[in-house]
């Protein structure tokens, strides 16, 4: 099923005057999971750019600057403030995010993409 859907999207993306397009930008964080399949299905001349890697590196830099809760008040004031947005359950994100980041996550806002 995934291959069929991918083939439909790629056929559409590289047709109707776009046959010579040379780059496919993976613009969603879960697309890297499909990268081997997309590489196989996309035209040979097309480079595949994985935006998730760049995004992950940028986020890692910001999260590396997080200051522990028990740090001095002045140090906490200078630290970046993190606010998280989730399209799924904010509570689920809070729990999973705490496991992945190794510290508690308090500020999670649910976002409905239809708005």
Image: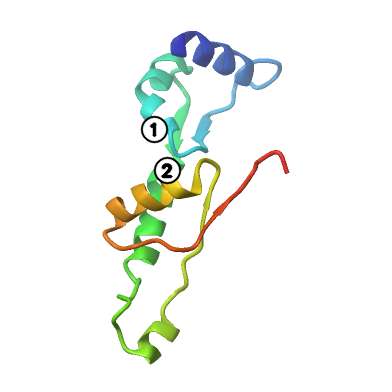
Q: Is residue 115 left or right of residue 24?
A: right
- What residue is drawn where x is 52% and y is 38%? 27
| Closer to the camera in the image, 64 or 41 | 64
Q: Is residue 48 left or right of residue 102?
A: right
- What residue is drawn where x is 31% and y is 67%? 64
- What residue is drawn where x is 44% and y is 85%? 77
Position above or below: 34 against 105 = above
* Few, some or many residues within 10 Å of mark 1 (<14, 14–19, 20+): some
Position above or below: 29 against 86 = above
Q: From the image, tell me which residue sits under label 1.
A: 32
Query: Toward which corner of the image does residue 49 lie, by quadrant?
Result: top left
Position above or below: 58 against 18 = below
| Closer to the camera in the image, 105 or 28 | 105
* SS at circle 2: helix
Q: Position of residue 1 (x, y in %)?
A: 46, 8
Q: Quadrant of the C terminus?
A: top right
Q: Position of residue 65 (x, y in %)?
A: 34, 72
- Furthest toward the front, the residue is 91
Query: Toward which corner of the image does residue 58 lie, by quadrant?
Result: bottom left
Q: From the image, tell me which residue sits under label 2.
A: 52
* Few, some or many residues within 10 Å of mark 2 (<14, 14–19, 20+): some
Q: Is residue 28 left or right of residue 54?
A: right
Answer whether labels 1 and 2 touch (C-beta < 8 Å). Answer: yes
Numbered disc total? 2
Q: Position of residue 93 (x, y in %)?
A: 43, 48
- What residue is drawn where x is 58% and y is 27%? 21
* SS at circle 1: helix
Looking at the image, what colour scheme do you see? rainbow
Q: Position of residue 55 (x, y in %)?
A: 43, 51
| Closer to the camera in the image, 43 or 6 | 6
Position above or below: 45 against 100 = above
């Amino acid at each position: 099923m995934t291959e069929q859907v991918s083939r439909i999207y790629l056929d559409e993306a590289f047709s109707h005057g776009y046959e010579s397009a040379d780059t496919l930008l993976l613009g969603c964080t879960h697309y890297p999971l499909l990268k081997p399949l997309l590489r196989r299905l996309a035209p040979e001349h097309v480079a595949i750019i994985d935006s998730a890697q760049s995004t992950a590196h940028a986020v890692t830099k910001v999260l590396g600057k997080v200051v522990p809760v028990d740090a001095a008040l002045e140090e906490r004031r200078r630290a970046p403030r993190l606010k998280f947005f989730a399209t799924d359950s904010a509570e689920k994100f809070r729990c999973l995010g705490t496991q992945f980041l190794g510290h508690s996550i308090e500020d999670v806002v649910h976002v409905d993409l239809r708005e």
